[in-house]
Image (spheres, grey):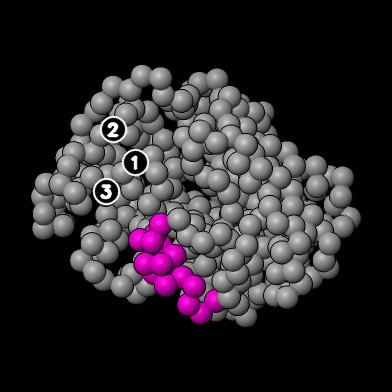
Amino acid sequence: MPDAPATLPNAQFWRGRRVLITGHTGFKGGWLALWLKLMGAEVTGYALPPEHGDGIFAAAAVGAGMTPVTGDIRDHSRLRECLLLMRPEIVFHLAAQALVRRAHRDPLTTYATNVTGTAKVLEAIRSVSFVRSVVIVTSDKVYENHGEDRPFREDDRLGGVEPYGVSKASAEMVTGAFRQSLGNNLPAVATARAGNVIGGGDWGEDRLIPDAIRAFRHGVALEVRNPASTRPWQHVLDPLSGYLLLAERLTQGEAKWRSAWNFGGEESVSVKDLADRLTEHWNGASGSPTAAWIAIPETGAPYEARALRLDSSKALAELGWRRRLPLAQAVEWTADWYIHQARGTPMDGPSMAMIDAYMRS
C-alpha cells in the first residue's frame, strides 16, 4: 500500500495571521519568513543584523513586505516592547548561536543566547495575553548520544558533552519547566528538533555546503574533515513545513501538541556521499566544471558525534509530516540556488519559486 501523501501547511490558516519570528535574519528564519509571506501572513521579525551580506535575508529581500525589528533576544525589555507593538498570535523562536565550532570557542555567549535567551523569550510571551502558540526550535543534538546505532525518539534522555548540544538540551529543559510550572500563564508551547539542513542562502562558517560553495567559487578543492560521518541531511523546507504544521495544531488548542517533536531526514548518508553529490551536480549545472573535494586529516578537533539520526514517526503519525524532497533533489535545489546567485540573479524570485514548487510537489 503506498504511503499517504504528506500533509502540507494550510495557506488559508496563515492568511492574515500575525506572526513573529525571532532570528528572521538567519538561514532557517529567512526561509520561514519568505514562506509565511507567500501564504499571506503578517510577519514581524526580531533579530540581530544578518552576519552575511550574501545570505538568504539580503539575497532574497526577506525584509520586504514584513516588519523587521533589530533586537537581541537577551534584551527582555526590547523584546517585550516588540510583542506589545506587533501583537502576534503565533511566535517561532529560531534566534540562536547555531554554530557548533563557534560554541567551543565562545561557550559563554552560546549559553547566554541559547539558554538565557530562550528563557527571556518565554518570559516576555508569558507577560502578554494575545500570543496563542509558540514553537521553540532547538536541534537534533539535544540527545545524550553514546553512539547508539538507532534513531533518537522524543522521549530519549537529553544531554550533551559539547557546548552547543548542551545549550540546546538546556533550552529544551527551560521550555519544559516553563510549560510545566508556569503553564497557566503561558500559551501553547512546543519544541521542534531538526538538524543538518541544506539549502540556498546559508553562509555559516564550518558548515559543509557553505564551505563547498566558497571553495567552488574560488576554484579550489573543498577540504573535508570527517568524510565518514553520517547525518540525515534534508532540505531546509522540509523541517520548516513541520514547524508550520505544528504551529497550526498548537493554535487549535489541544494539549497533546504541547510537547517535543522530531523533524528529521530519513536518508542518512556520509559527508563523503553528500560532497560527491554536490560536486557532481555543480560541475554539470554551473558551466564551470572545476569543483572537487579532498579529505584532510584533523587533529585536536572539537568533539562531534560520528552518527546521528532522528526517529520522526511521531510527526508522521500525528501531524502527517514527512520529508518531501529526496536527497538528490535537495542537493540539486541547493546547488542551483547558489549557481543563480553567482550569476547575479536577484534571489527573491527563485526562492519563492522553490517554496511554491515544494507546496505543489
Please check the rendered image and state whether residue 61 is part of the magenta-colored stretch, yes or no.
Answer: yes
Q: Which of 318 and 151 is in front in this view?
A: 151
> What is the magenta segment's predominant secondary structure?
loop
Amino acid type at circle 1 is Leu
Residue 166, by quadrant, is top right
The x and y percentages for residue 51 are: 45, 55
Q: Which of 304 and 249 is in front in this view?
A: 304
54 on left or right of 79: left
The x and y percentages for residue 197 are: 43, 47
- Identify the residue under disc 1: 208
Amino acid type at circle 3 is Arg
Circle 2 crowding by C-alpha within 10 Å: few under 14, some 14–19, many from 20: some
287 on left or right of 354: left
First in sequence: mark 2 vs mark 1: 1
The reply to whether dot 2 and dot 3 touch (C-beta < 8 Å) is no
Question: What is the C-alpha distance between the residues marked 2 and 3?
Answer: 13 Å
First in sequence: mark 2 vs mark 3: 3
Q: Nearer the viewer, residue 324 or 79?
A: 79
Residue 306, by quadrant, is top left
Q: Is residue 103 above or below residue 45?
A: above
- Identify the residue under disc 3: 214
Q: Is residue 45 above or below residue 116?
A: below
Residue at (66, 74) in percent of width and height:
18
Residue 292, by quadrant, is top left
Residue at (31, 44) in percent of width and height:
211
- Identify the residue under disc 2: 224
